[in-house]
Image (cartoon, grey):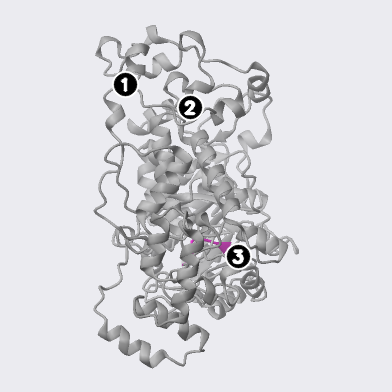
Amino acid sequence: PFPWASLLHSFLTSKEQFHAYLRAGGEEEEEEKEKKEEEQVSSSQSEPPAKRVKAEELRQDGESQGEAGEEEKERPEKKRARGQNKSRPCMKPNHYEQSRLCPSVTQGCAGQCHFGPRCRFLHDVSEYLAGKPADLGQRCILFDTFGRCPYGVTCRFGQAHLGDGHQNLVNSTLAEQWEGKLLVRNSLSKDLQQQLRKRKFSFQKAEEFLRGLRGGKGGKATGGSTEVSNCTAPQDGLGDSSGLQEQGEDPTAEALQGSRGDAPSIPTLGPLTDEDVTKLRPCERKKLEIQGKLYLAPLTTCGNLPFRRICKRFGADVTCGEMAVCTNLLQGQSSEWALLKRHHTEDIFGVQLEGAFPDTMTKCAELLNRTIDVDFVDINVGCPIDLVYKKGGGCALMTRSNKFEQIVRGMNSVLDVPLTVKIRTGVQEKVNVAHKIIPRIREWGASMVTLHGRSREQRYTRSADWEYIAECARIASPMPLFGNGDILSYEDANRAMQMGVSGIMIARQVPVGALIKPWLFTEIKEQRHWDISSGERFDILKDFTNYGLEHWGSDTQGVEKTRKFLLEWLSFLCRYIPVGLLEHLPQRINERPPYYLGRDYLETLMASQNVDDWIKISELLLGPVPPSFTFLPKHKANSYR
């Protein structure tokens, strides 16, 4: 079980009083505080013994540990839920599908519906509006920001921009300012999707590398036995660790010759340049100067584009998209390609790929190299979940060195941007193998390694081993190594940088981290603890909601998708303990808050781990939930009903 954080005694309360206060809606705040003070003086028989005792243990420096252990054994309690909710109910709202307006009507070309009379959507605006749910507000973020809302009558804030006859109004002054500007890149075009689905996309460079593997050239994916020395070798001073660059790649003469000018021509505009006909050598590739920068880790489910915009605003320097499965990308799945989208404010951006075999990973790398705009590509060799591990991906690659080498060499041979790798200390808890693998990764051609200081078996339940990360950083030199794990405050970040790593990656650390404390980037850069108020935290949620409506849309489908990801994020945000309530700074790894009453009603509401309270917060931002709405967080340990 997780230890309880040490809070000031005046804020502690019982489970019953906590929920009674929230049910009362904060109207009897003073009365509740008086009851809490009286209870603190009297005996605590009505409170859950475990939380009260553990809170006292922390204040008494462990004097009551033995008694608490006996009380824990006596109290019947279910085993703590762990892992994912794999049997979650389908939470996609389907009620609006029955009376959905055809996109051709929304876009102003009703007579050009591609499906004609076979279209299953409505074409009568009056009929649609008769069954449309009520608007959620008087202002539309898309209209206020861009001068035009592309969702027209389907917008759930339509009263802000609908005129007579349901005409979609346009603010020409604002619209002209944004005209021609590309706000989000890396979208999947219909033409490319058709090529991928019909398997007509040409993977010339990947096929050339894979033929070398099948032909047995060079044994382990080196491409041949006659090696050409690294072009950076005779040039002293070019291989320092101040930036990310390709290191250790030893292509054969045949591979170098085949990589020049053989790529299928892509129609472009403008004059012909050397880059159009000549493949860059490793030493000439784009370098990624991120040493000492704050790196927001790729976060599955919650690391979406709106969340990355929040972190970018608070000071994140490097961002990375959510883990994308290479086979899904090769099949042209729209949902998987959505993970690669890049906002124009993300100046240093990469994507993370997961796969288990060199053919699919190399082809996917070539596909992305030719179709999207990124600064680096990362290989996920740290994912601990069973679904990925049992298929040979994620952490399993650390035990499949031949396949691992072929993947790194293959992807490196087709990419024009740096290739990075994220790994763990190993698979088993007490068997570290990262120090053996890192020198080989450097030889295979990777530009950087990120090391999470836990094994697969440890998941997120033990403290990260920063002594081992420091040892691996020395072994990795001159290749940069970023450390990851237990960065909870600016003090932890300072200690981590003193370990000799090139930078730090900030992820979903339990219980704090970027998901629970996105302003952590500001704290690190300003070297302070930020006692952020509940009002400021609520404004962050407002911004996320607005970013979500921009990204996913302001119609019913977009609103509910924004709500879904907001609730997933709230399942982590509720673990944050305000700085002003802590007895000792900062909050430590795996410390969970006991029941406490915040400094106001909103702060208390945000501390609840009850799903119904999260839904109440979402309704403050996005209006009432649809009928029969249900939500279950992705992780079992995140909440209860």
Q: What residue type is labelled 1?
A: Gly
Q: Which amino acid does label 3 sit on?
A: Ile
Please report whichever mark, 1 or 2, sits nearer to the chain's N-terminal start. Answer: 1
Instruction: Name the residue that disc number 1 marks.
Output: 131
Residue 340, image x and y in percent?
48, 42
Quarter of the image where the N terminus is located: bottom left
Please report whichever mark, 1 or 3, sits nearer to the chain's N-terminal start. Answer: 1
Nearer mark to the viewer, of 2 and 3: 2
Q: In this view, does 249 lie to the left or right of 430?
A: right
SS under mark 1: helix
Instruction: Name the residue that disc number 3 marks.
Output: 504
Asked if the residue under mark 3 is in contact with the one under mark 1, i.e. CB atoms within 8 Å, the reply is no
Q: Nearer the viewer, residue 607 or 116?
A: 607
Which stretch is magenta?
A: 504-510
Identify the disc placed on residue 364.
none
Asked if the residue under mark 3 is in contact with the one under mark 2, i.e. CB atoms within 8 Å, the reply is no
| Disc 2 to disc 3, C-alpha distance | 41 Å
Query: Can you say whether 634 is above or below 434 in the image?
Result: above
| Disc 1 to disc 2, C-alpha distance | 15 Å
Instruction: Name the residue that disc number 2 marks.
Output: 157
Q: Which amino acid does label 2 sit on?
A: Phe
- Residue at coordinates 56% horizontally, 35% vertically from top-left? 184
Residue 219 in view in this figure:
no
Quarter of the image where the C terminus is located: bottom left
Q: Is residue 260 left or right of residue 82?
A: right
